[in-house]
Image (cartoon, rainbow, N blue to C red):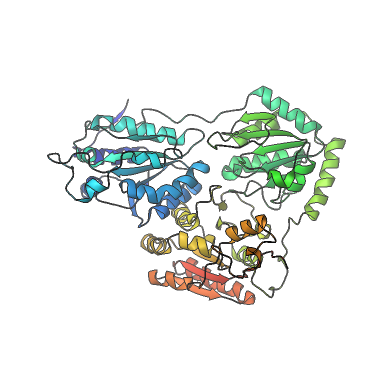
Amino acid sequence: MDQVATDEVASVAEGMLDLFVERGVEYIFGNAGTDFPPLIEAIARAQQLGRPVPQPVVVPHENVAMAMAHGNYMVTGRLQAVMVHVGLGTANALNGIYNAARLNIPILLAAGRTPITESGVFGGRNNYINWAQEMFDQAGMLRELVKWEYELRHPAQLEAVIDRAMAVAQSSPPGPVYLTLPREVLAATRAKATTPASPMMMPATKPEPCSEAVGRLADLIMTARKPVIVTSAAGHSEDLWSALAHVAERFAIPVVQYRPRYMALPTGHPMHCGYNPTPFVRQADLVIVLESDVPWIPDEVGPIAATVVQVGLDPLFQRYPMRSFAADLTIMSDAATLLERLLETLSDETEDTVLIRARRLEIAQQRRSYGVSSQFAEARAPATMTPRWVTACINAVKDEDTILINEYPFVLEELTIDRPGTFFAHSPAGGLGWAMGAALGAKLGRPSATVIAGIGDGTYMFGNPTPTHMVSRALGLPVLFVIFNNRRWGAVHRATLSMYPHGYAAHEDEPPFATLEPSPDYEQIVMASGGYGERVDDPAELPAALRRALHAVREEGRQAVINVICEAVYARTS
């Protein structure tokens, strides 16, 4: 194996940094603790000697650090690294690990481990907290959510452990891994003086569909009367956009993007049929599920008579304790690869059959019936501030390169999305506070793009705004945060109404555990970090406010917060 010659390597920590550089890790997002001294010394030494190291990014809350790594991966596709402080930092990072695990984001989360030795060893315990911070099983709190976890136990293991961590994280389906680093080991002299130029192991390749499964699916498509494609997370790949657009249009298959984490089809595509699968699945005789953990809600759809095809890198979602959606044909494959194979298989077939022509006409009618298009494209401001109006105003001011980060509030029907990589939404795990850090990570990965994050007032608080705004200013990452402020935990209130539509809570103006009042002046928080803040109550004033905020972001290089006071009324019994 080729070797990269290095200067004398002082410690395991410095050797780890060298490995990160060779493996393409650009940043270490971190929140430091007393376990970090070997790493800090290694970074300082490398910088003074003129040796490359990943850029250390100080993020004063682990939830934000994880979200930044998540967001950076979304736009770059490169493995990310985060380091946190022993079990305490790990606990704060759990929210982000949950999100990354459920959305297959490869992150190497490293955490210090409380020093093992009580005396006589360099790097051992020298602070009273070293006793109280030790845990019997530090990794136990996140073992269920990571693909692999391990503790670096000896300097001689360094290269093998790091390469295995990275290979597992990036193997299909990708996901986070966890590595604990005892301080004594990080401080020890590195066992090797050279860094392997190539990894000891490579990530496993994506699975490809067998020809028999592709042929069977092709037959189902050509004979179905009412097929539908449901997707949630298949749109991360640019190849998917092209392949899905061709398959759907050629063979007249409506596409429903249910709770999309990435858009998979342009919103103007003739087969784009909105975001509600229920009416399509109810009448379908073929349902093709592309990377969707929950393709419909069983209580809303009822029993279905369709043939169901589940497609994905993990089409049965084996890490979910319970998931019983039908799978008459299960294909483990990258969704784009499967669709490309379908196009090859169906290349000799004609798409101009009587059956496909009939499907095409029916889908055109369904698009009109199910409200796929905007309500506000040509409308005046409504009397009250609604999330739909706020979304429409954001859609009007963005350009084609703008990246939208969505944590619940956007009304998707009001968005025009024509390019891959310009819309990202929260993980199905719903770990709140993701969007703010993700927006910073996306801006870091694609500096030329305007980034707009849509967040609720509750998610703004979960996003740890003080650390987020500090990091935005420190790194020069101007982002526009739009708060859809309804002074509610909207999801909590809707869930209560769904179970008890005629109950006592339905008649409360301030339902228990769902009210976030008095509402803080969120727009003032960003000002403490040199940003632009504005509160907007009048719907007619929102377009101008957004233009002012975007001027601050694009022209002045400052972050901005628009605190939009939205209606707080939900469906309620009379």
Considering the image in quadrants, where does the C terminus appear? Answer: bottom right
What residue do we see at 68% from left, 57% from top? 413
Picture quadrant of residue 140:
top left
Q: Is residue 148 visible?
A: yes
Decide: is 440 above or below 8.
Answer: below
Foreground residue among 261 and 408: 408
Along the horizontal axis of the image, is 317 left or right of 7? right
What residue do we see at 64% from left, 35% from top? 324
Q: Is residue 346 visible?
A: no
Along the horizontal axis of the image, is 442 left or right of 138? right
Image location (x, y in percent) of residue 106: 45, 41
Decide: is 94 above or below 392.
Answer: above
Along the horizontal axis of the image, is 289 left or right of 134? right
Picture quadrant of residue 286:
top right
Q: Residue furthest right?
A: 354
What residue do we see at 65% from left, 64% from top? 506
Considering the image in quadrants, where does the N terminus appear? Answer: top left
Foreground residue among 144 and 99: 144
Image location (x, y in percent) of residue 216: 72, 26
Decide: is 351 above or below 382.
Answer: above
Image location (x, y in percent) of residue 219: 76, 28
Q: Residue furthest front?
A: 504
Along the horizontal axis of the image, is 239 left or right of 201? right
Q: Residue furthest left?
A: 120
